[in-house]
Each structure stands twice: as C-alpha cells, then as structure tokens.
Image (cartoon, rainbow, N blue to C red):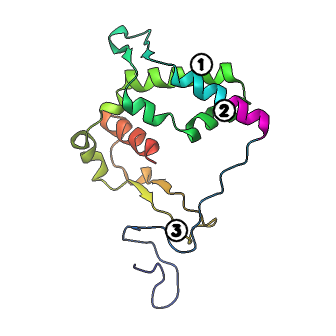
Amino acid sequence: MESQFSHSGTLEPRRTALLAPTPGSKPYPRPKLSPDQEVKYKTLLSEVMSWTIITCDSDISESGPITSRERIWLTRECLLRYLRATKWSIDEAVKRIQATLVWRREYGLDDLTPEFLSPEQETGKQIILGPTEYRPEPTANPAFILHAGEDDRYDASWGRVSCLNDQLQAK
C-alpha cells in the first residue's frame, strides 16, 4: 500500500485508494444498550418487520409492497439511529422511518443507476476516503469529502444532487 508520507517525511495527500482498513484502524465498539433501550429496540424492530406496504400520499403510484432493498436498509444501526434521534420514542421513530421510506421512494433513490451517476462521479469532487489511521481519530469508518469549490458550474442539477445523495447513503 502506498504511504501518505513523502521521502522528506512530510504528510502529502493520498492519491490512491485504500483497499482495506489500515492496521491501526479499529471500528468503534457497538454501544451497549440499557435494558430499557433493548426493549424499545426490539419493539421497534417487531413493528418494522410487520410492515408490508409503503403508502406514499403525494404520489400514490409510488405506493406498494415494501421491497427487499428497503428491508436491507432497515438495519439494527439504522433503527438505533432513529431511536436515538427521537430520544427513544418508539412512536416518533416509527413516523420518521416511514417518512424516510416514502421520501426514498418518491425521490427514486433506489432507482439511481451507475450510468446516471457516472458523469458526476467522474469529476472527482466527491470522494469516500476509506478507513485510515492517518485521520485525527483512527477508526474503520470511511470519510466523505466533497470538494464543491472545484466546481465551475453553478446549477444544482438532478444528477449532481442525486450523486450527492448516493454518496451519503453509501456505507
């Protein structure tokens, strides 16, 4: 793997991809849940697992059975993020998750193709830097870097916004 340090010992920007986490990179440990939080998580999980239909109010044609991609998105970490964001309110977490699933459908996030995203990706303005120990806090988490200042266009085209959303959804 190529080093980030030059022959003079100074730190230089990495120009190649990191194919695997560096030895010093460690993921954050999974947070321990209190017994009450564990019960709330299991309650939310059983609620989410019971969903069979997503109903889109503003575009009824987008309504339909929950897809496997939507189920895959509903990970343990995803559900816990919503619970933490709602201060462990199950009802509020359910509302927000349903609203997010509706938004993802109406926006068409799961329908974005590589061919559609490729022109924006090729500009190199959006980079996901892999896990590295050279970041201030060495973890196995990737970092998303957006070089918006390098853009000579001023429009917020559908492709540009879609590409940004795709990158932010990447795991």
Q: Are the two marked residues, 3 and 1, in contact with CB atoms closer than 8 angstroms?
A: no
Residue at the disc numbered 3: 132
In the image, what residue occupies the spot 36% across and 70% down? 16
Mark 1 residue crowding within 10 angstroms, few (<14) / some (14–19) / many (20+): few
Please tell me whether the stretch drawn in magenta is mainly helix, strand or loop: helix
In the image, what residue occupies the spot 29% across and 46% down? 120
Helix, strand, or loop for circle 2?
Answer: helix
Residue 58, position in %: x, y? Answer: 42, 10
Left or right, residue 44 beside residue 61: right
Q: Which region of the structure is painted magenta?
A: 34-41
Helix, strand, or loop for circle 3?
Answer: loop
Residue at the disc numbered 1: 95
Residue mark closest to the camera, 2 vs 1: 2
**Label ID, residue 157:** none
Mark 3 residue crowding within 10 angstroms, few (<14) / some (14–19) / many (20+): many
The tag earlier along the polypeptide, 3 or 1, is: 1
Residue mark closest to the camera, 3 vs 2: 2
Q: CA distance from mark 2 to mark 1?
A: 15 Å
Residue 55, position in %: x, y? Answer: 44, 12
**Of the residues shown, which amino acid type is indicated by label 3?**
Thr
**Of the residues shown, which amino acid type is indicated by label 2?**
Tyr
Residue mark closest to the camera, 3 vs 1: 1
Residue at the disc numbered 2: 41
Left or right, residue 77 beside residue 60: right
Report the front residue among 32 and 94. 32
In the image, what residue occupies the spot 66% across and 25% down? 43
Residue 90 part of the magenta-drawn span: no
In the image, what residue occupies the spot 58% across and 73% down? 24
The tag earlier along the polypeptide, 2 or 1, is: 2
